[in-house]
Image (spheres, rainbow, N blue to C red):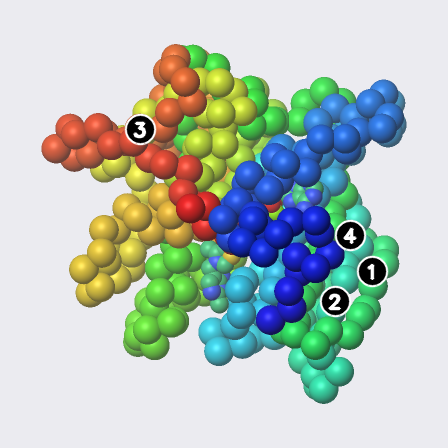
Amino acid sequence: MLQYNMYTNRKPGDEMQLKDVGEFNFIRHIQDNTIHDPSTVITGIGDDCAVYSAKEETDQLISTDTMVEGVHFSFHYMKPYDVGYRLMTANLSDIAAMGGTPRQIVLSVAAPEYVDTAILDEVYRGIKDQCAKYHLNILGGDTVRTEGPMVWTVTIIGDVPKGTAIMRSGAQVGDIVGITNYVGYAATGLGALSYNLDGYHMTKVGHQRPDPQIELGQQLRQLGIHSMNDISDGLGSELNEIASASNVSIVIEEKVIPLHEETYELAKYLQTNPVDYALYGGEDFQLVFTAPKSLLPKLENLAGITIIGEVVSGSAQVQMVTPDKTIKTIEAKGYNHFHES
Ligand SMILES: Nc1ncnc2c1ncn2[C@@H]1O[C@H](COP(=O)(O)OP(=O)(O)OP(=O)(O)O)[C@@H](O)[C@H]1O
Ligand SMILES: Cc1ncc(C[n+]2csc(CCOP(=O)(O)O)c2C)c(N)n1
Ligand SMILES: [Mg+2]
Ligand SMILES: [Mg+2]
Ligand SMILES: [Mg+2]
């Protein structure tokens, strides 16, 4: 293992390793000194996309997400086509979370030199099919050699009508909290694939080929919702992000969280708690949002929306009422690439 401390003035034993600092603390730490021309920036680091003004009638959205072989995907569970498809979904999902329309991407690949280019072609086919579906242009990228596993990075650009991007910070006391479709779905599929279980057809596809909620994101923005986040790290983590960005607390009800029947089946088989797949599983690429109560009738008319709770005043706590009426605090412990100690 390379001794990285030879490049710093820290003594051996004094290192603050990434695994001890954690992904989210690290991001907070590098946030200083990042904006050198504030005149165009509406939101920098801290939301699903950054928002900046470029044109009269729209605000631009920009976001990037990386997928690493062995961390975000395994060729044991996913075909190369699926890797490209899901890479695009992860990126499109952050545009959906702002209520935006995707427009352009650039994409980079780091691959070992012995990789069969037929595999790369298949990943590209998955990327291109998703881009065709959403009328997205592929404008460029980068290709490099790596001595490690394959790494794919997409940077996506989109837009929203001026001043309408839905931020994590807009939740208001009295709002209702809603989510789209099922949660815990992709984690169920990944569990079934990794235990090599038969069946679980729906959720296996949910892991391999999830779809972004672009249309629902736009419809929710047009209805006038207050805040939104996409579910990449798990509902627990995303609700905590909304609560802390908005400086409010959130209470959800466990029994109304929409779980697929395959999630109950897997939880029974593995003797785990089904709701944990929703709270801590991640990669569902569904949307969680808060909206004024007055929107309830309109939200009920949209397919695939479930109201799971409400926004209350408090110091950025997320709590869940269990079926026996116990109140549990939901920690911000969704998927974290480097676990905080
Ligand atoms: N290395 C980095 N340098 C600068 N900004 C970063 C870095 N990593 C993340 N960010 C920013 O921090 C914020 C949170 O990033 P995060 O990756 O959690 O968002 P996300 O894409 O919504 O989540 P996920 O990666 O789970 O899909 C975003 O605004 C992102 O642009
Ligand atoms: C082989 C394999 N092992 C584990 C997982 C689970 N996983 C990886 S990253 C992530 C959260 C989102 O990451 P990010 O924050 O980088 O978007 C999750 C739930 C997987 N998909 N494939
Ligand atoms: Mg996001
Ligand atoms: Mg990200
Ligand atoms: Mg993301």
Above or below residue 152? Residue 15 is: above
Q: Earlier in the sequence, mark 1 or mark 2?
A: 2
In whole angstroms, how far apart are the C-alphas of marks 4 and 1? 8 Å
For image coordinates 41% across by 26% down, the residue present is 177
Q: Amino acid at mark 2?
A: Val
**Direction from residue 147 to residue 335 in the image, left or right:** left
The quadrant of the picture occupied by the N terminus is bottom right
SS of the residue under disc 2: strand
Q: Are marks 1 and 2 in contact (CB under 8 Å)?
A: yes
Instruction: Please name the residue that numbered disc 3 is placed on.
Output: 319
Q: Are marks 2 and 3 in contact (CB under 8 Å)?
A: no
Q: Name the mark on residue 204.
A: none
SS of the residue under disc 4: strand
Q: Which one is in front, 169 or 316?
A: 316
Q: Position of residue 334 (x, y in %)?
A: 42, 45
Mark 2 residue crowding within 10 angstroms, few (<14) / some (14–19) / many (20+): some
Residue behind label 2 places its C-beta within 8 angstroms of ligand 2: no
Q: Are marks 4 and 1 in contact (CB under 8 Å)?
A: no
Instruction: Please name the residue that numbered disc 1 is placed on.
Output: 141
For image coordinates 38% across by 71% down, the residue present is 193
**Direction from residue 10 to residue 310 in the image, left or right:** left
Above or below residue 294? Residue 27 is: below
Q: Amino acid at mark 4?
A: Ile
Instruction: Please name the residue that numbered disc 4 is placed on.
Output: 105
Q: Name the mark on residue 109.
A: 2
Q: Amino acid at mark 1?
A: Gly
In whole angstroms, how far apart are the C-alphas of marks 1 and 2? 8 Å
Q: Amino acid at mark 3?
A: Gln
In whole angstroms, how far apart are the C-alphas of marks 2 and 3? 40 Å
In whole angstroms, how far apart are the C-alphas of marks 4 and 3? 38 Å
